[in-house]
């Protein structure tokens, strides 16, 4: 016996609500201790698919030539499963690392670095990286 009136379909969660629910389910299945602070932000703040997609586009245009298309590393390090804070990612992207990585501060904004961080956090961790 249904508790919904006849002819009414149950509403499905969509958009931000579905993403937030997915994140919370991930936390419930893995336990909050398994998540870093920024992972927890992803799970609870419902980062938009638009920002992750924008981050992917920025990564392809600015980062993939050193970090590989899948962020697995080449000249630059593997960025999958990165454990740096969003603030540290912003600092490194904007200021660079002397002798290792160019600064992108004249090309990318703080909002761009947030999208890059959102994209990086959306990537699966490499096999064997269970920390």
Image (spheres, rainbow, N blue to C red):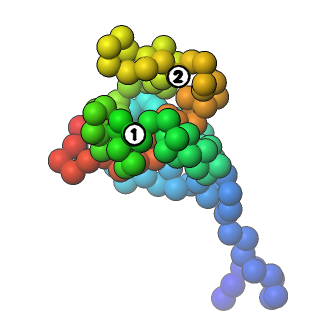
Which residue is at the front of the view, 10 or 55?
A: 55
Q: Residues within 10 Å of mark 1 (few under 14, many from 20)?
A: some
**Quick check: 73 left or right of 28?**
left
Q: Earlier in the sequence, mark 2 or mark 1?
A: 1
SS state under label 2:
loop
Position above or below: 111 against 115? above
The residue most toward the top is 98
- Res 100 quadrant in image: top left
**Quick check: 27 left or right of 49?**
left
Position above or below: 56 against 13? above
Using the rendered image of the protein, determine whether residue 33 is visible from the camera's viewpoint: no
Q: Residue at x 43, y 20 (%)?
A: 102
Q: Residues within 10 Å of mark 2 (few under 14, many from 20)?
A: some
Q: Residue at x 53, y 22 (%)?
A: 104
Q: In which quadrant of the rendered image does the N terminus lie?
A: bottom right
List the residue tagged with mark 1: 65
Which residue is at the front of the view, 131 or 58?
A: 58
Using the rendered image of the protein, determine whether residue 13 is visible from the camera's viewpoint: yes
**Quick check: 95 left or right of 111?**
left
SS state under label 1:
helix
Q: Residue at x 35, y 36 (%)?
A: 66
In x, y percent, where is residue 30?
34, 49
Position above or below: 60 against 13? above
User: Which of the numbered marks, if any, corresponds to residue 104?
Assistant: 2
In x, y percent, where is residue 121?
44, 41
């Amino acid at each position: 016996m249904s508790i919904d009136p006849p002819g009414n379909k149950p509403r499905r969660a969509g958009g931000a609500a579905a993403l937030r629910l997915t994140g919370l389910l991930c936390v419930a299945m893995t336990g909050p201790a398994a998540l870093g602070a920024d992972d927890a932000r992803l799970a609870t703040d419902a980062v938009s698919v638009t920002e992750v997609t924008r981050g992917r586009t920025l990564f392809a245009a600015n980062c993939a030539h050193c970090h590989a298309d899948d962020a697995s590393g080449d000249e630059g390090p593997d960025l999958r499963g990165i454990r740096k804070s969003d603030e540290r990612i912003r600092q490194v992207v904007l200021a660079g690392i002397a002798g290792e990585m160019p600064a992108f501060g004249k090309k990318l904004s703080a909002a761009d670095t947030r999208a890059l961080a959102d994209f990086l956090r959306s990537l699966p961790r490499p096999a064997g990286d269970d920390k």
